[in-house]
Amino acid sequence: MAEKTYREISGATRDLFERGKAAVQKNNWDYALTIFNQVLSDEPSFFEGREELRKAQFLKADQKKGFLKKFLKTARASPALAKAQILIHSNPDEAIHLAEQVLNTNPENRLAHKTVAESALNAGYYKTAVLSFEIARKNSPSDYNLA
């Protein structure tokens, strides 16, 4: 299945996407994340929506940094990522959704990006796979398996 462009998604989803972009401009990160997750729930193959979601995730993460917070986020992410790993081949859209929930709290999580990328390849979302591999490689330059 090929990824959809802005013109190929429904009008209601387009309106929702525009509201998410407006929320990003107003620095309302939580609302933007909620909206972009809804957009991708409606249209899992919408690449521009996924790009905007990643941007909002990183912008929100830049606001809150700290070792303890990062450690706790990683610990909470383990069950969701384990379930996503199981679903990579049988239900790649659900695996992507679960991994993106982890990325909402920790957008630098290498395993979540790797899970999104592998699931995207199985679903035929090649641009999404490249985006996730690039982000994971940028965040973990010493991981030669990602290269």
Image: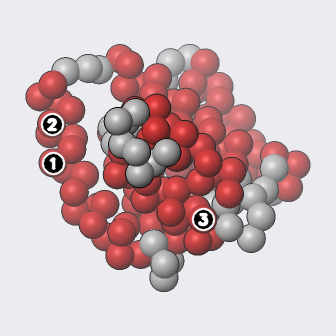
Residue 125, x across and y down, in percent: 67, 60
**Secondary element at image label 1:** helix
Q: Residue at x 43, y 59 (%)?
A: 115
Residue type pointed to by label 2? Phe
Q: Is residue 93 above or below residue 134?
A: below
- Residue found at x 68% / y 57%: 126
Check whether the beta carbons of the residues at disc 1 and disc 2 lie within 8 A of each other: yes
Residue topped by disc 3: 121
Q: Amino acid at mark 3?
A: Leu
Closer to the N terminus: mark 1 or mark 3?
A: 1
For the N terminus, give its image quadrant.
bottom right
In depth, the one of 39 and 109 nearer the eye is: 109
Q: Is residue 86 left or right of residue 26?
A: left
Q: CA distance from mark 1 to mark 3?
A: 26 Å
Classify residue 101 as left or right of residue 21: left
Q: Name the residue that disc number 1 marks.
A: 75
In the rendered view, would you say 6 is above or below 78?
above
Q: Amino acid at mark 1?
A: Ala
Q: Nearer the viewer, mark 2 or mark 3?
A: 3
Residue 95 position, x and y percent, is 45, 66
SS of the residue under disc 3: helix
Q: Residue at x 59, y 43 (%)?
A: 131
- Left or right: residue 39 versus residue 97 is right
Q: Residue furthest left?
A: 68
Q: Are marks 1 and 3 in contact (CB under 8 Å)?
A: no
User: How much space separates mark 2 and mark 3, taking CA atoms?
Assistant: 29 Å
Say above or below: 47 vs 87.
above
Q: Are marks 2 and 3 in contact (CB under 8 Å)?
A: no
Q: Quadrant of residue 18?
A: top right
Most distant residue in the front direction: 144
